[in-house]
Image (tube, coloured by chain):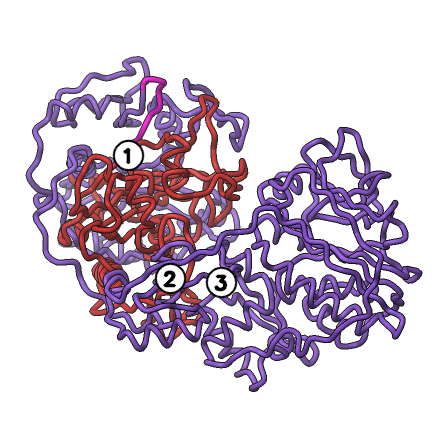
Amino acid sequence: MKVSYNWLQSYISKPLPEPAEIARLLTFHSFEVEGFEKVGSDWVFDIAILPNRAHDALSHWSVAWELGVLLEQKLNPLIKEETSFNPSDRSLEVEVEDSKFCPRYTGRIVENVTVGESPAWLKGHLASIDQRSINVAVDIANHVMFSIGQPMHVFDADKVEGEKIFIRMAKEGERITTLDGKQVELSATVLVIADSAGPLAIAGIKGGTRAEVDGKTKNIIIEAANFHGANIRKTAKKLGIRTDASIRFEHELSAHLVEPAMKLMTRLLVELCGSADTKVGEIVDVYPNPEPKYEISVTTKQVERLLGVSISASKIEEILNRIGLEWKPGYIVSVPPTRLDLRITADIIEEIGRFYGYDKISGVLLPPSAKPKVLKSYYYSEEIRNKLAQEGFSEIYNYSFASEGEIELMNPLAENRGFMRTELASGISERLAFNLHNKDLLGVDDVLIFEIGTIYLNSGEELHCVLGSSNKKTALPSLIPFPVKNLYEGIENVLEFNFTALITDLPQPESYTDLLPVEITNITYKPFSLLPFVARDIAVFVPTEVLAEDLFNIIKNETTDLLINHKLFDVFTKTFPDGTKKTSYAFRLIFQAKDRTLTGEEVGVIMDKITDLLNSHKGFQVR
Amino acid sequence: MQSDNVKQKGHIHPLSQVVRQAVGIFNDLGFEVAEGPEIESEYYNFDALNVPKDHPARDMQDTFWLKNGSLLRTQTSPVQLHYMEDHKPPIRIIVPGKVFRSEATDATHEAQFYQLEGLAVDENISLAHLKGTIEEFLKRLFGKEEVKTRFRPSFFPFVEPGVEIDMSCFKCDQKGCNVCKYSGWIEFMGAGMVHPTVLKNGGIDPEKYTGLAFGVGLDRLSMLKYGIDDIRLFYGGDLRFINQF
């Protein structure tokens, strides 16, 4: 939510600290400030209001209130002094079909207004949070919403049939032209504000053009209402219309908010659009089931137990006072009607904790406890991992999704990923082929891979283990230290077995200690090039004193960092006819560039250089 | 350097390595490893965790629903409930597990990934214990003398108070670097005190017992630790990646 610094300042008499300090205070005690920037003579914050505070805190007043608590300053009253208005005898009739969807509706008529342009301060407030100025009446309604979080609506009273408003479900097929000129078809789950001629507005979401307030409007109906959040959300989604109003209603607002909202709106409307002739009608308030008042008990002991820090009674009372929570000794705290998120003791403790400051809590370890029980599936998985790694197998993790299976998804991400896998073998087979292409790059003799993962059947989930080798000669079953049954005899050199079934027969281990070394590996991953690599072999006869390492270092000096891997694949000694003994070393060299595909020619040039260099050494002979 | 006399060395997946380290650390702190099903019911994944029926997280956009009415778990938190139902306090468990989110995949988002859940329930568990436990875990995981943490107020339906936890940057020791975006802090997990309703749903008396809970994304943690730039690498089965670890 965009929040204007100047707007916040208008609620607090003392000058606010710098924006950076405001951001810090809010982030560590209230909501995360994701950023802020200068906009003209103002600063605008981007604040992530927590989902459980959206019912009251999507407003400047509430953010200012948080600051007031943190800076220990009281907020200026929203309305400085009550004034009286000339009464109107035009009264509004309101009929609410089902209070489940509209728990509270307040409306009043204001007669004899002039709807023109908004004054600069109002335009400025709206502009700072990227809101368009429409006309003074609509702007005031928006201003009230962004000030105190209650969405408002205004109708041209003379365009409403009779002076009766219905809050009802739309009839199938009813239509409305919304304020942005779109024709919207309604259905029986859409709540509308209507007159006897038909819908005037999609309740809580968007108004219609029929009773639109424009420059010619003389008499206005103000609406401040409370709508059932779940229904508003459903409708907004169904119609594909999401507005600042619907976002607030979706999160469920307190029905209490309509009171200050109606007061503030009336006051501003009369001030900015009114004259001596302006008359204000009675508020019609349909509120059959008033929200109950809540009281929550909390003790200093409970606070200390949950937070893990000792806060004195006087400090707790000071915080409760600053937050504005009325309390009786004990403590019994009265919840302000707009705070729908305060319902249990833990909620009050959170309020105390966050304003006290989490930074004041020091960490402590849990007391020592009995040695934990070992989880068999984890223990034996680790044992297999260690064994297979020793045997040269690398572990892969594959996707759980497959193109066929017993368990089907309703909303898969891709067509061929519509099921949960029932086996691991096909996945590993495919990865064997893939990795085989890079065998030389990897510097391995064979591609040896395994996976330990879940498969999903109608009868339940099973943990399976699968191994695969690119070498037909690898005797896979002999690598597993337990008797296993291969589930897929047909697939070439792949062994998959049911791990869950296997471990039921294995003993319960006492501890992990023989399995878990907790060495800290400080590897930094190096991104690898996806471009093709070139492999070249070179074999050299050298005097027997020369070690493979020395020989390679000579080669390395000649190549650039295009040489990314190498492998010594053959060593033997030979006695020549003249009696000299020499060692032959054969290397496979792997070349790859990060930014381009290396050509055979380029590599050929490098190989020629290496050959010449080696041959220039005494006693060296490239084969 | 290899010759054909030496067997090639196998590599354990980096996520398995991080889980192994975490299990070792938490085992020392008295935490048992627990597990639970990847296919879950709406009850255990949402309702019993105090996620209200009209919560945006339940929309089709985030959850993979199955045609048989179940779903793929979106978090490892359901295992808290399964375990509590079968055990009386004191409880200390960690749950490393695969979770699923219906999200478009990119360098930082995947449809399946791994989380590490933690739960401790006893008579006097507090936010201070949460801080101490996490700081100890991070200290050992990154091999540091000390790791600082910062708690920021946040909201999750299954904890109250709820917090976001930042850790002091392990890479630059808070001097400023690109890992911590020059702020000295890395945001990395959510946590809090177990909501009394969740304890009740697990058959535990919230008047007598309190609990701490946390959930950390293991893929993200590994990416931070090893400097990995793309989450999809974990599931690509590409030895050019895995054999680096």
Residue A227 in view: yes
Identify the amino acid type marked 1.
Gly
Q: Which residue is mark 3?
A: A336
- Is the C-beta separation of discs 2 and 1 under 8 Å? no
- Which of the two discs, 3 and 1, sits closer to the camera? 3
Identify the amino acid type marked 2.
Ile
Q: State which chain disc 3 sits on.
A: A
> Of A269 and A383, which appears nearest the observer?
A269
Q: Which residue is mark 2?
A: A348
Tell me which residue sits at (12%, 24%) in the image.
A482
Is tag 2's residue or tag 3's residue first in the polypeptide sequence? 3
Q: Which residue is mark 1?
A: B36
Residue A362 location in percent, x, y? 24, 70
Residue A74 location in percent, x, y? 52, 79
Magenta segment range?
A451-459
In the figure, the red chain has which letter?
B
The answer as to whether the residues below labels 2 and 3 share one chain is yes
Count of numbered labels shown in the rendering = 3
Q: CA distance from mark 3 to mark 1?
A: 41 Å
Horizontal side of residue A539 vs B236, given as left or right: left
Q: Secondary structure at mark 3?
A: loop
Tell me which residue sits at (81%, 36%) in the image.
A175
Vertically, is B58 above or below A173? below
Res. A109 image quadrant: bottom right
Q: Secondary structure at mark 2?
A: helix
Q: State which chain disc 2 sits on.
A: A
Residue B7 in view: no
Q: Colour of chain A?
A: purple
